[in-house]
Image: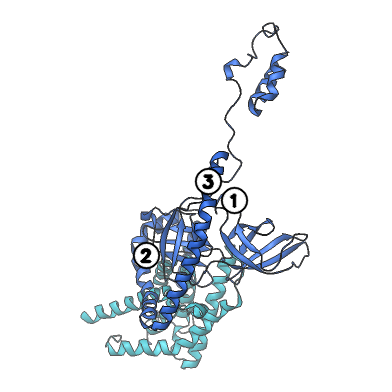
């Protein structure tokens, strides 16, 4: 036993130098944390170091991959046949639905062209697989095997066959990390499909549910109502299923109703996910309509002597309201300035 | 000469393995039961050869873990540094504890670590975690005797005792 290191590890008297070093390291850690929390540049450091991190992710993902391979290898024939049968039926049903939808979609497309909008019902997606890596308990994040080299960008929406799963929050060269919609730090704008009520679904503390904490008391919300993305906020496109309401109750303060919802996506079972490529429309008001009025050089010159508009002074005032908003305002202010 | 090298390799390998173990997921419902591997392995080395484990090493391991974890750089560095500091201070006493007392001490370390983690997260603006948050230290403490004996046995088999 190496007990006789008297000067190095004294039995009872603490050393001052050790405490000082502890303080220095703790301060360093705190500075790192604050910098990482506030600024974004440490993400770049992480991106640079991903050359080390990513292989480790792949290695750490091997056990779960092996486990899955083993499940498939040792699954009995009957279960596989059953699964196959079920998938066939699903596919048949889906195809039948699609065929019925096709004509409606075409009609929709035509009508939308008439309305001159940019929406389309077609999906521009990219397939990704999960890597089985645990990024800490109570952190609802998943790692995907696509990254910046596959043109993945932060903010892309992750969906599976049943609904929205989450969004990409960090991209490395060949992997990316997505935050699930059940993360307590996540919020997604939703619409209740039956009534059209708009609200926001947050991740829950427990982590497997969604909570909708601020529904107006008078709103019509029932268990079983479906939630779809509302497209507000400019991150999630419209119309993807998010979840189903399980129960509704009063909040403690009584000012709002609060509901719990079960996410529609298979958050803990999906192996293959889809990344949406086209993001929702940008947030904010639509762009100004193009100037439809007469060209600017035809507008009366504000600096012109007051005698020139004399021949027919009422004409601009009559025509102005028929033109679109911006020129009307411009011409009226110009007229107001002249007298 | 060669022995020292093997010893260092073994030391580094266990630490790296603990980082990988931290990333390997457990099947769904077992997830909250996962022990904090880097802390356990680091504690073992603290008790076994305290002059090799320094605060700087704990800090570096923590930063490495944070890089893999990808959450908040410095979080685990803070936790591991604090833990190693306490462990090194009480090392001489901890080594002579019987196994059950040592296990209790490890439980204390791990609980303290969780409190630190909770502080960091709450200050960072996260909501309070659910009750399962507190299971992991107990699992870690329950695994401690086995981990200690296995690592000790392996060390003896590799004949890489302290000089």
Q: Which residue has dot 1 on it? A: A233
Q: Colour of chain A?
A: blue
Residue hosting label 3: A109
Give the residue furthest to the left: B2
> What is the distance, in whole Å, between disc 2 and disc 1 at their CAs?
33 Å
Helix, strand or loop status at disc 1: helix
Q: Please report contact status of discs 2 and 3: CB closer than 8 Å, yes or no.
A: no
Tags 2 and 3 both on a single chain: yes
Q: In this picture, is A15 found above or below A114?
A: below
Report the quarter where the C terminus of chain A lies: top right
Disc 3 from disc 1: Cα separation: 24 Å
Disc on the earlier residue, 2 or 1 = 2
Q: Nearer the viewer, mark 2 or mark 3?
A: 3
Label 2, on which residue?
Answer: A53
User: Which of the chains is cyan?
Assistant: B
Which residue: 55% across, 81% down? B135
Is A72 left, or right, of A251 in this rendering? Answer: left
Residue A64 drawn at (x, y percent): 40, 76
| Residue at 44% in and 90% down | B145
Q: Secondary structure at mark 3?
A: helix
**Toward the viewer: B46 or B126?**
B126
Same chain check for tags 2 and 1 = yes
């Amino acid at each position: 036993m190496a007990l006789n290191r008297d000067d190095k590890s004294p039995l009872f008297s603490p050393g001052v130098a050790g405490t000082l070093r502890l303080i220095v390291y703790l301060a360093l850690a705190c500075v790192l944390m604050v910098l990482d929390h506030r600024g974004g540049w440490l993400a770049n450091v992480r991106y640079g170091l991903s050359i080390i991190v990513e292989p480790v992710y792949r290695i750490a993902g091997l056990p779960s991959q092996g486990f899955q391979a083993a499940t498939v290898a040792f699954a009995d024939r009957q279960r596989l046949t059953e699964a196959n049968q079920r998938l066939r039926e699903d596919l048949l049903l889906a195809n039948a639905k699609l065929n019925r939808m096709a004509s409606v979609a075409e009609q929709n497309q035509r009508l939308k062209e008439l309305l001159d909008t940019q929406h389309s019902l077609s999906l521009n997606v990219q397939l990704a697989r999960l890597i089985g890596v645990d990024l800490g308990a109570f952190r609802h994040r998943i790692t995907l095997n696509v990254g910046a080299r596959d043109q993945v960008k932060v903010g892309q929406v992750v969906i599976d066959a049943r609904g929205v799963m989450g969004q990409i929050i960090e991209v490395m060269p060949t992997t990316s990390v997505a935050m699930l919609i059940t993360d307590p730090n996540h919020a997604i704008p939703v619409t209740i499909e039956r009534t059209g009520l708009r609200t926001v679904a947050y991740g829950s503390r427990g982590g497997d549910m969604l909570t909708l904490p601020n529904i107006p008391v008078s709103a019509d919300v029932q268990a079983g109502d479906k939630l779809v993305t509302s497209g507000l906020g400019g991150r999630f496109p419209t119309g993807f299923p998010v979840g189903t309401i399980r129960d509704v109750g009063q909040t403690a303060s009584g000012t709002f109703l609060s509901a719990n919802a079960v996410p529609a996506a298979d958050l803990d079972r999906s192996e293959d996910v889809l990344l949406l490529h086209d993001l929702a429309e940008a947030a904010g008001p639509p762009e100004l309509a193009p100037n439809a009025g007469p060209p600017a050089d035809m507008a009366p010159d504000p600096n012109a002597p007051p005698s020139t508009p004399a021949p027919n002074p009422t004409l601009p005032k009559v025509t102005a309201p028929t033109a679109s908003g911006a020129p009307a305002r411009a011409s009226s202010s110009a007229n107001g300035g002249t007298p | 000469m060669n022995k020292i090298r093997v010893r260092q390799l073994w030391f580094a390998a266990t630490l790296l393995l603990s980082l990988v173990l931290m990333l390997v997921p457990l099947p769904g419902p077992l997830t909250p039961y996962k022990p904090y591997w880097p802390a356990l392995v680091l504690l073992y080395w603290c008790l076994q050869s305290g002059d090799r484990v320094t605060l700087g090493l704990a800090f570096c391991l923590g930063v490495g873990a944070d890089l893999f974890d990808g959450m908040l750089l410095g979080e685990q560095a803070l936790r591991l540094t604090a833990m190693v500091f306490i462990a090194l201070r009480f090392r001489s006493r901890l080594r002579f504890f019987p196994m059950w007392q040592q296990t209790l001490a490890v439980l204390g370390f791990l609980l303290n670590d969780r409190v630190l983690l909770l502080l960091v997260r709450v200050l960072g603006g996260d909501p309070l975690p659910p009750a399962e948050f507190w299971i992991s230290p107990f699992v870690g403490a329950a695994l401690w005797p086995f981990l200690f004996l296995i690592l000790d046995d392996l060390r003896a088999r590799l004949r890489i005792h302290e000089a």
